[in-house]
Image: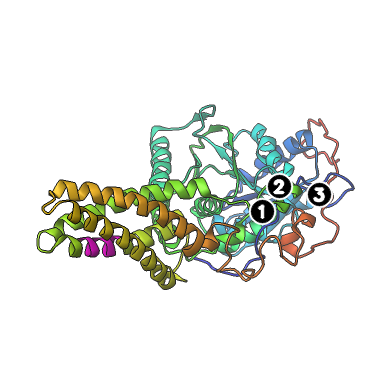
Amino acid sequence: MRTDSSPGTLPAREHLPASAAGTPVLDVVIPVYNEEKDLQPCVLRLHEHLKRTFPYAFRITVADNASTDTTPLVAARMAAQIPEVSSFRLDEKGRGRALRTVWSSSDAPILAYMDVDLSTDLNALLPLVAPLISGHSDLAIGSRLARSSRVVRGAKREFISRTYNLILRGSLQARFTDAQCGFKAIRRDVAQVLLPLIEDTGWFFDTEMLVLAERAGLRIHEVPVDWVDDPDSTVHLVRTAADDLRGVLRVGKALAGGSLPLDRLARPFGDDPRDRDIKDVPKGLARQLVGFCVVGGMSTLFYLLLYSAFRGFAGSQIANALALLVSAVANTAANRRLTFGVRGRGGAVRHQAQGLVVFGIGLALTSGSLAALGVATSDPGHSTELAVLVAANLGATVLRFLLFRAWVFQDQGDEPACANSSYASTAYGNSPYPTDQFRAGDVADRTWGEPTTRLQPVRPYDSQDPRNPR
């Protein structure tokens, strides 16, 4: 998994300004491999659609993945004839490699791609990119599995697609509905930070991009699409499925191990500049409470099982101490990862040491409860002991959460930590770069404070000849 350096924490999203003419607003990339027959009809149809319906300047980029037929010649000829078309030649195959290369070098603030077969109805293109232009979302995807989508394809591809998305939901907790639809868009400022973290260069590129974006808290907009399967598709389903499953395993391991600096993709709290002035507002309290309760419930069951096991060969005080010690270590580790979202091994020893202090407090409460029970009755029943311990643990649990949040993991409850980023020392409030002056694309090319890309509405043309210049 890539851990390359990247420009850093993202600024707040803003609506792209529409003023004087500038570079194209939208760059639609069409990755191709040996598509000499379908390429020209696809590009001409897309070009005609954009001229007729898209209100801003645009570009169509043909990304040739080391084709061995006349595809490069077809792309070059169209680029010479149509001003809005350009071509890019890669010497290696891989759709992900093509998208990363073209998107990384593009100057358009909105980057998109679609398959050359145009299986997706082009009427979904404007709804796809509109939330990115407005600043509402970071990425946008077409979904064939949305309720209102209309899809025509065979049972085999339908089964594979739905099964794959179920695997993503079960293994990587993905919430987006369709990872494989070849119809996606991303803001350029997001792409410049996200692309260096993506390792795959093939078909899994889309999934990896979406999973990392979602885990980082970026906003993904989904558009229902009308989609008709291409019966002549050259995609090798079995090989692609195997590669995707290997990718799922690799990304899952990276996320579990905390090796990805996803804090680089964090957004400020709110996109309204007034939100950045809010001070001392606790963040994530509801989520942390839910996570802590779930971990606490499992820890309590684990503790009671251990206590019952240790009680068979030791006294109540010794059994309680041993059960609390083992469960406390497990509880701290679980809360560290699941409740407070701390990834990696950094600070793990310190957190466990502080957790043991919290354990000592809990031990004092429960041991005191057992001592009080011993004073009250000389021979308490096992069920009575468990009831007293449950009550004592409830009180210790409330205190444990407060200590975890205010002391052990205090850095995780406020502003996002950037331990893995070169921008670790700068939080939103004291960053040397004023985020309220950032606009789309500034992070990517480091032009903070310079004039941003200016967009000019382009008058649509309703020409019957898609090759007719403006």
Q: Secondary structure at mark 2?
A: loop
Say which residue label 1 marks.
268
Q: Is residue 465 magenta?
A: no
Q: Is residue 421 above or below residue 122?
A: below
Q: Choose top left, top right, bottom left or bottom right for residue 137.
A: top right
Number of other residues with Cα within 10 Å of mark 2, as a class: few under 14, some 14 to 19, many 20 or more: some
Specify the amino acid type for callout 1: Pro
Q: Amino acid at mark 3?
A: Pro
The quadrant of the image that shows the C terminus is top right
Q: Give the residue drawn at x 66%, y 47%.
A: 112
- Looking at the image, residue 136 sits to the left or right of residue 353; the answer is right
Dot 2 and dot 1 residues touching (CB under 8 Å): yes
In-front residue for pair 296/73: 296
Q: Residues within 10 Å of mark 1 (few under 14, many from 20)?
A: many
Report the magenta residues as a range. Answer: 320-327
Query: Mark 2 highlights which residue?
Result: 271
Q: Quadrant of residue 446?
A: bottom right
Circle 3 packing at 10 Å, graded few (<14), some (14-19), many (20+), is few
- Left-right relation of 427 to 210: right
Distance from label 3 to label 2 (Cα)? 36 Å
Q: In this picture, is 154 found above or below 188?
A: above
Mark closer to the chain start, 3 or 1: 3
Residue under label 3, please give it.
83
Residue 272 is at least partly visible in this image = yes
Q: Is residue 358 left or right of residue 318?
A: right
